[in-house]
Every structure is written in C-alpha cells, then in structure tokens.
Amino acid sequence: MSTVHTGIQWLADWPHWYAGLTFARGIGPDELALRLGAVPSQRPGPLAGPDAWDLAGAVLDGDGVARVGAVGAWSFAVEHGVPAGAELLPEVSRDGVEAVHLDPQPDHPPKQFVYARDGEVVCCFGLGEEIWRGGHHPDFLLPDLVAARVLRPDGTAARPDTEPPPARDRRTLSVIERRFGLSLPRRLVEEARLPAFVTGA
C-alpha cells in the first residue's frame, strides 16, 4: 500500500523540496496568484510539477511560475523558479487575510517560515533556528514551540543537539501544521495538473 502524504510534515523528508509554498486563508487561488504578482497575459494553463519547472527555466529574468489550488480552508501556491511569497506576504495578507510562506532555501539554509496577517508579518524564523524569531509578534508561536519541546519558555533551545535535521524540521513543521491547520498532499506538489500563472518580479 502506498503512503498517503497529507499535512506538511512530509516536506522534512522530501529530497525534492525546491519550490516555495505560500498558503492564504480568506482568498481564493486566483486571487492568491494575483497577489503574488501573476501576469494576466501569461497564463499557461494547467501544469504538473515537471512542466512548471521547465517553464520556470524558460521565462525571463526574475520571473517564476505559480501553480495554485485549495485544500480545506487554505488556498495554496507552489512557486517554481523565483518564489515571491516571502517578499509579498504583507500584500498577500492584506484586508484580513492570513498567509503562511515556507521557503526551502536549498542554496542558503535553513528553510524559512513566515506568518502574516492583515498586511503585516506576525512572526518568522528558520527551521532549526527558532531561537531567532522576528516579526511584529515574534513570540506568537512560542507556546506551541514549547509544547513541542522545540524551545523552552524563555525562548532558548530545548531540542537535543544530536537531533538529525529531518527530525528537527519535522518537529517544527508539525507545530506549523497543527497551529494553522495546513495540509498539502504531496501529489498536488509533484504530479497534479494545477492552474498556473507566470509571476513577475
């Protein structure tokens, strides 16, 4: 029987996580694409992951390709090429919208988490570097991270130094998954033909 990959913890064990992921609650997938800089005249149609990567390699300077959909209460964008989600998250989250961005940072670890709401970044940190938190409310997830034994109540590290990176990342992703109710089946990222947009830098 094949494994069903739900939630987002599977990302910690996925060797092909190179795409940025942006989630938004309060807007639909097409609006999410627009807030990520979708170019209205460049909509290539439904694309699977490999096709989106091919297109991302062919588009002009600084552009990317966003494949969009919805799971539960959240719209999502899989951002191939140049991810715009981190820089545009305040715009994505304007007018009462919540937004979460996960950036794999394959060339400059660690992986990054950002949460924004109503036009401002609430909190952000690197996976494995949760002791260094930013945003307008950097301790927003502190109780959840303490409950998961990632941090101590004073914000210092609680995890063992010997914890392997995949287990470390999975533990923090589990906090994000539970706190926001996020789920993104692996097949949607890898295989599904989703509506796609070229996004301008």
Image: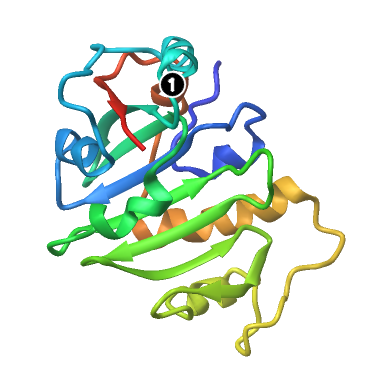
Q: Which residue sits furthest front? A: 61
Q: Is residue 42 above or below residue 36?
A: above
Question: Residue 121 vs residue 5: left or right?
Answer: left
Could you say where residue 53 lies in the image, as x and y percent from the top left? 48, 17
**Closest to the observer, 46 or 83:** 83
| Vertical side of 196 occupied by 112: above or below | below
Task: Say whether residue 49 is left or right of residue 37.
Answer: right
Splitting the image into 4 quarters, where does residue 65 fall? top left
Residue 181 in view here: no
Measured as percent of width and height from the top left, residue 44 is found at 26, 12
Q: Quadrant of the C terminus?
A: top left
Residue in the picture at 44% in, 17% down: 49
**Relative to the observer, which residue lies in front, 131 or 141?**
131
26 lies above or below 15: below
**Identity of the residue furthest to the right in this view:** 162
Q: Is residue 99 visible?
A: yes
Give the residue type at disc 1: Arg
Residue located at (39% from left, 79% from top): 136
Extreme-bottom residue of the structure: 154
Number of marks in the rendered image: 1
How busy is the neighbourhood of tag 1: few (under 14 within 10 Å), some, or many (20 plus)?
some
Quadrant where the image shows the N terminus: top right
Q: Position of residue 39 (x, y in %)?
A: 22, 28
Coloring scheme used: rainbow
Considering the numbered disc 1 on the image, is that residue within a helix, a strand or a loop? helix
User: In front: 195, or 146?
Assistant: 195
Residue, x 36% and y 16% (percent of image)?
A: 192
Q: Residue at x 50, y 16 (%)?
A: 57
Left or right placement of residue 63 versus residue 167 in this view: left
**Pointer 1: what residue?**
187
